[in-house]
């Protein structure tokens, strides 16, 4: 827990620094360069002998090198390293940072870390040596951080860079050195493999790579080298810098061409002794003129000539001739009529699959007209013509549609194309695709619903076998990542639950490679264009290296922030909640709270899971794993990096203490607003920010009221809030408390149970569908997180949802495990392109859709909720700007509950340990899991009591002081509840008005909750398209109907879109209205991130579960 | 690719005069029960004259007029029998048997113009039942859309795709009209003119779904107004032949949104009664090929 908090703070700080101080990054870059050079030296040295540590920097480098080598031996290394580290401290800057970096990351990181010397020292002690990869080391660091407290946090902030790096590294998965380095610099990349070679003293294998000009390149590679190593060898040979468009392919045992995964060992991929590869274009740049270097264009030309000649890229007669003429011009220069030679060579060359004399004559005729054109110009013209071909860059895969008709699936930069006999019969642009998955030989894409459609649809195709399905899936994932993302989606780490393939695109995206190549500063390398087969050897450009590195560094930096954001918002939240409980007790002082959040991010990034495990129960582990899952799914390229940072800063600075919060509510709000603005300004949603601002206030109030009494809780809340970067979490916790309350009631009084149990139902549902739901929810959430932040509710909801999911998972651990085992088979895999879509923040629609998916899933979950008595619940949410779905509300509630639970846990430290386990069981039981139910009942009383209070608080926050009455209600068994709750998120004045509750304890079946948020005109331009949704999901006992009304009005210059959604949930079983509400709100916000929720009215009619009666 | 010249650049127009048998034989097939439709031959010929005059004198195209054949009452719908892109002409295989002999004269003209002729009906005799008519083909400059209608089938579209390999060929259902070009046409390099009917919108949605490009859409209220002829004249001026205000009073204002266009209101009421429209009456060819 402490660790978590610490991590958060760090992240925030990092963000701050990054925003405020661009310098460090630059410095870091410089450092990196230096390091690289040094590293190169070191390599040599190492080759000779590893240890020449006597000299300052060189020592350091060797150390980490050693570390890497001895990764397996982490523990011993650690011991040895400390001394070295100390030395390094003395030496100073570079080393200092290194230790932290080492903890998580690698060389570069270390370098960057240099600035934060102090931090380094502290951490260095424990971690420095500890291999970055080793998790235990991380834990240690975290703990240390917590101890250090505020000071450390500051330091940590300094070490922001390091953190970012860490994140990146993490993102890269086990990536270890090579994976991470791949993006960074050639030198580093090369180094790592070399090291490996030395270590293992493995046998060398000769690889033959067929280059695009027809020549063969062979090189020796250590047998266990990864694909990356060979690829970079080839690129080095070619003197190619813009290498991200290319890849190595091999032919598998089934004569299928496959791409060599750079992050995996070659040997394990080719599965044969045939070390034959081909160097090919992997991603065809849609606009080759944007390539920086002629050599890149030349290689692309070579690829396209082959594509054209073999018929892979079909084109007309005239186009064949034209392309051929440019080829001649590029390779032979001007047409020389005196020489008879042209006709000769033309005969020997293949320009087209059906080449004939007529075409050759046409080629020559056109060639004459190109007089004076330089080879580079001819290549450019070649590409300008080739890129317009409809099949340019389309990777075709044979398949059958659902009716068994032969079709071709084409993967390209824009999406997925469906062909039948040359005719394009359908097209799925990447933004339209919500999920890509395969199962056995089936390939599925989930399509975002169109304007007139209510539900997303899933389109299935059959491929020849499961291998081809997987290959297609991988190509889709890679193409989507490359062309649509700002930065690659970090690969999913091994988690508790493993769903199918963890494959993700690991290279740079087009956006990144463009940035990188824009920094290329070398003179155009000389290369010889030849009529194939002639060796065009590139110069081995030594100077190039430095340039490349610089570019790479920048890209990396760009990435990092994104990763952080995502991880923070999502993962942190989840992890934190459990962790918070622990942390909170320890840190009662406001300062502590600050620390906690800072640490939290650390955790998340650095495999928090493990920490949790050690500290707490299995439940926590599960949660962590879940969180990671979510994160993996969710992690989409975050918006602009700076935004999050600011956000974090604000959070840290503002909230730390509860008291503070109360006093400074306004200020906080302002801060939030400003933060939001800053972010959104980037994103382009100013209006949202305003609305968001308004919302946060209520949250704060609630927190204050609730937590003023219980300091511990408040801190926890703060932490969570800080973690999320939003105050919202507190509200969430409150809600959660409410939600949880019902549970206790249920336990206590059977009569009410139905109502109370409702929350449990949600959980249950989740449990059953866990795998799917989680995945889905995760995916959408990420996108949401960014957008949503503006509105606290959303965040809360999201957080809650995540938390719930976690808890549910934890509870369901057993179940999940079984499920997971099933799903783990590599025959299945899913990929949520939308999440990643984050590339363009502006593309809200995608996110919305994802949200919708989530919503639906949630609904399903709800519906699935088993046997509860019938509880019809109507949720009516009129939302001015933001149309929220009831489902969202449900989710929110559920999430809130979880959060609340977590918060409770934190409050009750003693109980906490038990709580966690308790929590899971409770949820599970609610969920209707038979076995779990028993447990839950057992636990319920205790938990219920605990939970009730917090729950009450939660309501109180919203309503004001009414929470307790609710508790009372709970205590009273047979009660019918009638509650009118009106919550308005407005500015302070409105707030007071908003909260209106009728005393809860009346026996009534009707409960109405109204949320109101005062909106500035912020609603602004929602998406004009508007979602019209009417959904009815019927499961055994639940029926959910959603009706959406959309109204557009013009205010001043601004168009305002009002969406009013009415969601009716009817069911025989218990329905948790809170959950429903939360979910609905959440979903709505997700769907309309740029809108704000103005009003939420929950009308609940419950037939009292009068079982006892 | 080889079609570097700007979209809509043409040098020649091929037309076929209105025969005396105009409207004589049942033109039904198009959903227009013109058995009852009374067409004014003289008026039709007048309107035809106006069209050719506009093409020749206003736009400045070279006009090639194929003499009418009384045996071929629908031969004036010359658009149906060939699809021309760049220097390639695909001689189509019309749905109606009696129309298939119309292609002969057109094929001859194409050969004279040095256009590469590809036969749809020639391939293995029957071409597998492929039928395609030019009025179901919308070429946008970037890709082909083939409307699958009562007169055009998928096989025909495949032949088209094989003929014009440089371009994506997408098939779309024809809703809200008998022919694809009855509900939409090109109003510029990136502009699609489409009528306001629900069917047309449905077709448009499908087209938008299938394309990688973004087109501007100009919606016109009257159904018949959606068929226009866009030509980029020799002096790079944009010409748009459209139905006059007398025939489509509400749509004229829409056309005036097109910036810097020379609008050429051209009457077509008689041909329209037979399910044809402006574009049906001419084939446009660009013989000035520049590849660079």
Image (spheres, coloured by chain):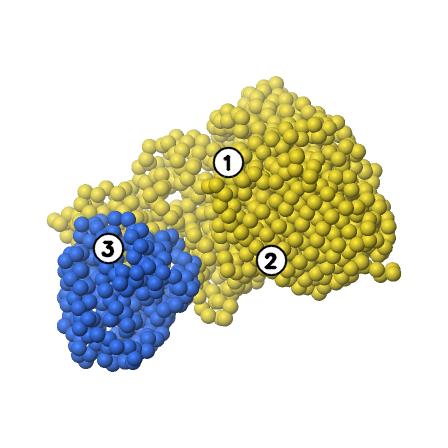
Residue A637 pos. (x, y %) = 53, 42
Residue at 73%, 28% (x, y): give it: A659
- Give SS at disc 3: strand
Picture colour for chain B = blue
Q: Name the residue under label 1.
A: A681
Q: Is residue A760 above or below residue A139?
A: below
Residue at the farthest left position: A338
Left or right: residue A449 versus residue B272 is right
Q: In which quarter of the image is the C terminus of chain A?
A: bottom right
Q: How crowded is mark 3: few (under 14 residues within 10 Å), some or many (20 or more)?
A: some
Residue at 54%, 40% (x, y): give it: A1018
Pointer 3 indicates a residue of which chain?
A: B
Marks 3/1: CA distance? 44 Å
Marks 1/2: CA distance? 32 Å
Q: Which of B54 and A65 is in front in this view?
A: B54
Q: Name the residue under label 3.
A: B263
Pointer 2 indicates a residue of which chain?
A: A
Q: Name the residue under label 2.
A: A1043
Residue B142 pos. (x, y %) = 32, 56
Mark 1 vs mark 2: tell me if same chain. Answer: yes
Residue A164 pos. (x, y %) = 57, 34
Q: Quadrant of the N terminus of chain A?
A: top right
Picture colour for chain A = yellow
Closer mark to the observer between disc 3 and disc 1: 3
Left or right: residue A947 versus residue A338 is right
In the figure, residue B200 lies in which quadrant?
bottom left
Q: Mark 1 or mark 2, which has the lower sequence index?
A: 1
Residue at 49%, 70% (x, y): give it: A404
Q: Is residue A94 above or below residue A619?
A: above
Pointer 1 indicates a residue of which chain?
A: A
């Amino acid at each position: 827990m402490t660790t978590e908090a610490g991590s958060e703070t760090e992240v925030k700080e990092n963000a701050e620094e990054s925003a405020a101080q661009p310098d460090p990054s630059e410095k870091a870059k410089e450092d990196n360069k230096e390091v690289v050079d040094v590293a190169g030296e070191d390599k040599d040295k190492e080759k000779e002998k590893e240890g020449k540590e006597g000299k300052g920097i060189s020592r350091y480098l060797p150390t980490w090198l050693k570390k890497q080598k001895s990764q397996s031996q982490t523990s011993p290394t650690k011991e040895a390293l400390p001394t070295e580290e100390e030395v390094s401290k003395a030496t100073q800057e570079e080393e200092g940072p290194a230790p932290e970096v080492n903890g998580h990351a690698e060389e570069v990181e270390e370098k960057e870390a240099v600035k934060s010397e102090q931090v380094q020292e502290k951490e260095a002690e424990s971690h420095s040596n500890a291999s970055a990869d080793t998790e235990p080391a991380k834990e240690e660091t975290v703990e240390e951080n917590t101890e250090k407290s505020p000071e450390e946090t500051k330091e940590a902030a300094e070490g922001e860079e390091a953190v970012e790096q860490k994140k990146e590294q993490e993102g890269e998965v086990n990536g270890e050195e090579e994976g991470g380095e791949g993006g960074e610099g050639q030198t580093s990349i090369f180094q790592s493999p070399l090291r490996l070679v030395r270590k293992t003293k493995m046998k060398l294998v000769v690889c033959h790579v067929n280059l695009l000009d027809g020549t063969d390149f062979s090189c020796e590679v250590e047998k266990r080298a990864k694909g990356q190593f060979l690829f970079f060898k080839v690129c080095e040979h070619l003197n190619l810098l813009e290498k991200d468009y290319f890849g190595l392919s091999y032919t598998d045992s089934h004569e299928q061409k496959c791409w060599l995964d750079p992050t995996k060992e070659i040997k394990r991929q080719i599965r044969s002794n045939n070390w034959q590869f081909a160097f090919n274009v992997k991603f065809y740049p849609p606009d080759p003129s944007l390539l920086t270097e002629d050599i890149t264009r030349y290689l692309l030309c070579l690829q396209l000539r082959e594509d054209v000649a073999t018929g892979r890229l079909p084109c007309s007669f005239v186009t064949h001739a034209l392309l051929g003429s440019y080829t001649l011009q590029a390779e032979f220069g001007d047409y020389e009529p005196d020489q008879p030679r042209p006709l000769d060579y033309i005969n020997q060359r293949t320009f087209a699959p059906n080449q004939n004399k007529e075409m050759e004559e046409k080629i020559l005729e056109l060639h004459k007209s190109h007089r004076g054109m330089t080879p580079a110009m001819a290549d450019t013209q070649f590409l300008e013509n080739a890129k317009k071909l409809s099949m340019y860059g389309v990777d075709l895969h044979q398949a059958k549609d659902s009716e068994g008709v032969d079709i071709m699936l084409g993967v390209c930069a824009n999406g997925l194309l469906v062909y039948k006999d040359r005719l394009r019969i359908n097209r799925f642009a990447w933004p339209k695709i919500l999920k890509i998955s395969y199962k056995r030989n089936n390939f599925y894409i989930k399509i975002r619903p169109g304007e007139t459609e209510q539900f997303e649809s899933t389109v299935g195709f059959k491929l020849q076998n499961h291998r081809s399905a997987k290959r297609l899936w991988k190509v889709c994932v890679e193409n989507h990542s490359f062309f649509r993302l700002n930065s690659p989606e970090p690969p999913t780490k091994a988690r508790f639950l493993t769903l199918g393939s963890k494959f993700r695109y690991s290279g740079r995206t087009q956006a990144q490679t463009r940035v990188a190549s824009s920094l290329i500063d070398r003179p155009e390398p000389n290369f010889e264009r030849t009529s194939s087969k002639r060796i065009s050897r590139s110069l081995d450009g030594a100077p190039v290296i430095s340039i490349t590195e610089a570019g790479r560094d920048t890209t990396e930096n760009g990435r990092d922030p994104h990763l952080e954001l995502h991880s923070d918002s999502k993962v942190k939240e989840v992890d934190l909640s459990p962790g918070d409980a622990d942390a909170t007790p320890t840190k009662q002082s406001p300062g502590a709270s600050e620390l906690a959040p800072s640490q939290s991010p650390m955790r998340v990034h650095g495999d928090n899971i493990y920490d949790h495990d050690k500290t707490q129960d299995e439940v926590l582990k599960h949660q962590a794993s879940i969180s990671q899952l979510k994160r993996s799914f969710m992690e989409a390229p975050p918006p602009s990096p700076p935004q999050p940072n600011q956000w974090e800063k604000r959070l840290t600075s503002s909230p730390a203490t509860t008291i503070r919060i109360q006093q400074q509510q306004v200020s906080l709000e302002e801060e939030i607003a400003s933060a939001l603005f800053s972010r959104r300004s980037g994103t382009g949603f100013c209006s949202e920010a305003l609305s968001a601002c308004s919302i946060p206030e209520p949250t704060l109030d609630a927190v204050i009221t609730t937590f003023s009494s219980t300091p511990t809780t408040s801190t926890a809340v703060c932490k969570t809030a800080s973690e999320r970067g939003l105050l919202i979490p507190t509200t969430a916790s409150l809600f959660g408390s409410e939600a949880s309350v019902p549970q206790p009631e249920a336990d206590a009084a059977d009569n009410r149970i139905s109502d109370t149990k409702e929350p449990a139902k949600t959980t249950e549902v989740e449990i059953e569908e866990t795998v799917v739901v989680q995945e889905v929810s995760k995916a959408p959430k990420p996108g949401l997180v960014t957008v949503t932040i503006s509105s606290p509710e959303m965040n809360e909801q999201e957080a809650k949802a995540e938390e719930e999911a976690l808890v549910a998972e934890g509870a369901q651990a057993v179940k999940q495990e079984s499920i997971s085992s099933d799903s783990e088979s590599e025959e299945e895999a899913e990929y949520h392109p939308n999440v990643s879509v984050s590339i363009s923040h502006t593309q809200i629609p995608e996110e919305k859709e994802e949200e919708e998916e989530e919503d639906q899933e949630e609904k399903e979950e709800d519906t699935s909720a088993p046997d509860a008595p019938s509880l019809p619940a109507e949720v009516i949410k009129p939302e001015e700007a933001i149309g929220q779905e009831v489902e969202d509300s449900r989710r929110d509630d559920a999430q809130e509950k979880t959060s609340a639970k977590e918060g409770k846990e934190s409050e009750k430290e003693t109980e906490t340990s038990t709580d966690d386990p308790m929590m899971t069981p409770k949820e599970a039981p609610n969920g209707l899991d038979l076995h779990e139910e028993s447990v839950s009942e057992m636990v319920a009383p205790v938990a219920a009591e605990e939970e009730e209070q917090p729950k009450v608080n939660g309501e109180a926050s919203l309503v004001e002081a009414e929470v307790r009455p609710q508790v009372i209600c709970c205590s009273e068994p047979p009660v019918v509840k009638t509650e009118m709750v009106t919550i308005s998120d407005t500015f302070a004045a409105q707030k007071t008005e908003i909260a209106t509750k009728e005393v809860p304890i009346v026996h009534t079946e009707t409960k109405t909750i109204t949320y109101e948020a005062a909106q500035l005109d912020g609603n602004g331009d929602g998406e004009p398209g508007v979602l019209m949704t009417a959904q009815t999901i019927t499961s055994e006992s639940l029926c959910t109907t959603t009706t959406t009304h959309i109204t557009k009005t013009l205010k001043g210059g601004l168009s305002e879109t009002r969406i009013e959604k009415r969601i009716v949930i009817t069911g025989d079983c218990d329905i948790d209205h809170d959950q429903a509400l939360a979910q609905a709100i959440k979903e709505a916000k997700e769907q309309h991130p740029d809108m704000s929720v103005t009003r939420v009215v929950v009308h609940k009619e419950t037939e009292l579960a009068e079982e006892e009666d | 690719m080889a079609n570097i010249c700007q979209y809509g650049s043409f040098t020649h127009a091929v037309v076929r005069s209105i025969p005396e048998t105009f409207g004589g034989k049942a033109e039904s097939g198009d959903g227009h029960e013109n058995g009852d439709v009374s067409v004014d031959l003289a008026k039709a010929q007048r309107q035809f004259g106006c069209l050719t005059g506009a093409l020749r004198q206003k736009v400045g195209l070279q006009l090639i007029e194929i003499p009418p054949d009384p045996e071929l009452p629908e031969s004036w719908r010359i658009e149906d029998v060939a699809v021309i892109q760049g220097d390639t002409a695909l001689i189509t295989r019309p749905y109606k048997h009696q129309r298939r002999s119309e292609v002969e004269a057109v094929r001859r003209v194409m050969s004279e113009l040095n256009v590469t002729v590809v036969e749809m009906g020639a391939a293995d005799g029957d071409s597998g039942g492929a039928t395609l008519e030019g009025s179901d083909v919308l070429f946008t400059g970037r890709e082909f859309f083939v409307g699958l209608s009562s007169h055009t089938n998928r096989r025909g579209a495949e032949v088209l795709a094989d003929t014009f390999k440089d371009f994506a060929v997408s098939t779309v259902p024809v809703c809200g009209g008998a022919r694809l070009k009855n509900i939409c046409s090109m109003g510029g390099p990136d502009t699609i003119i489409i009528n306001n009917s629900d069917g047309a919108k449905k077709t448009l949605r499908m087209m938008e779904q299938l394309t990688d490009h973004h087109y501007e859409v100009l919606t016109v209220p009257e159904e018949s107004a959606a068929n226009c002829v866009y030509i980029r004249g020799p002096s790079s001026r944009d010409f748009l032949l459209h139905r006059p205000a007398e025939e489509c009073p509400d749509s004229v204002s829409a056309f005036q949104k097109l910036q810097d266009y020379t609008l050429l209101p051209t009457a077509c009421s008689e041909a329209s009664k037979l399910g044809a429209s402006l574009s049906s009456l001419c084939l446009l060819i660009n013989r000035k090929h520049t590849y660079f």
